[in-house]
Amino acid sequence: MSPWAAGGTNDLLCRLLAREAGRLLGQPMVVENKPGASGVIGTTAVARAKADGYTLTLGSTPGYATAQALYPQLPYDPLRDFAPVIGVATVPNVLVVPPSLPVHSVRELIAYVKARPGQLSYSSVGQGSTQHLCAKLFERMTGTEMIHVPYKGTAPALQDLLAGRITLAFENMPPLLPQIRSGALTALAVTSATRVSQLPQVPTVAESGLPEFTASVWYAVFAPAGVPASIMARLQEAFTSALALSEVASQLAGLGLTTLASDAAATRAFVQADAAKWGGIIRAAGIKPE
């Protein structure tokens, strides 16, 4: 299950992995999109599913690393209610604006937004998404104020951004690459600690004047807690083999994703560390659901 709408990075990854892992398992895997509440609705459904190995989810940063800090009444425990199958990949967000906006750098954008407090807008795919949190951090670190416009998925958010109805976005890189390369959107910075090979000319947010600003999105396959060890082992073998395929690695790299392929223990440790990081940031910044 993908807890996000069709067309975004999670959906693209889900379909790629389902196709290849299903082939290796000898059983087709069907992708169901269940978006809403920044991934919480679909993630909750998987947490409550029968622990038989037939229901899996491609989890990511919002549902597992940020949700607990944002939502006191979260209907699941990201670590207790799930068993990691494998860590899949990480990817940065990209700060983009429509070409009609008269800015060409992060510094110019900051000045432009400061001159128009509360008038400009940014999109996200929901409360607690990395798009939302990156923009909130940007506001906090620059002393700016913008309007948050949440969408149910990347596709409708991009439509409004391309049409100039939204001022900016910190969006996942994969769906942005064609728009950036065609000139339909202007990339001002990437949120990773270093520049990325897919956009080598685009600086990081950190080197653009906000040195402590870094953020990446991770993706991992999870099963409901309690799936028998023998079934988990078979799933882990299939997904590990799928990620090792050259055509899969090539597609991930083309999308700007860095492959993790981490085992269950390493994935759990990674999720715990990321939850601690984002939880601290959310509390320090006073970020709350709107």
Image (cartoon, rainbow, N blue to C red):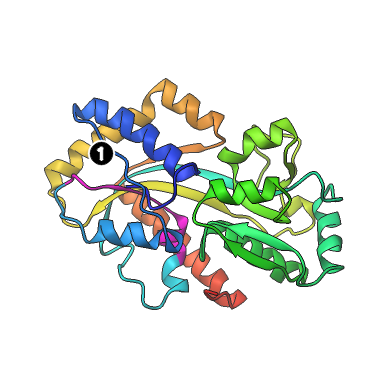
Looking at the image, residue 22 lies above or below residue 144: above
Q: Which residues are magenta?
A: 53-66
Q: Residue at x 38, y 53 (%)?
A: 3
The percent coordinates of residue 45 (x first, y second) are: 27, 59
Q: Secondary structure at mark 1?
A: helix
**Residue 260 appearing in the image:** no
The percent coordinates of residue 68 (x first, y second) are: 41, 70
Residue type at mark 1 is Gln
- Residue 60 located within the stretch drawn in magenta: yes
Q: Quadrant of the C terminus?
A: bottom right
The percent coordinates of residue 111 (x first, y second) are: 86, 62
Q: Residue at x 87, y 68 (%)?
A: 115
Q: Which residue is mark 1?
A: 236
- Residue 178 located within the stretch drawn in magenta: no
**Residue 2 appearing in the image:** yes
Left or right: 258 in relation to 136? left
Looking at the image, residue 254 lies above or below residue 229: above
Looking at the image, the residue that sits furthest to the top is 246
Looking at the image, residue 168 lies above or below residue 143: above
Looking at the image, residue 61 lies above or below residue 245: below
**Considering depth in this image, is 250 or 26 the residue closer to the camera?**
26
Q: How many marks?
A: 1
Left or right: 237 in relation to 131? left
The percent coordinates of residue 280 (x first, y second) are: 53, 71
Q: Residue at x 76, y 51 (%)?
A: 207
**Considering depth in this image, is 103 or 119 the residue closer to the camera?**
119
Rate crowding at label 1 as few (under 14), some (14 to 19) or many (20 or more) other CA atoms within 10 Å: many
Left or right: 175 in relation to 4? right
For residue 21, which quarter of the picture? top left
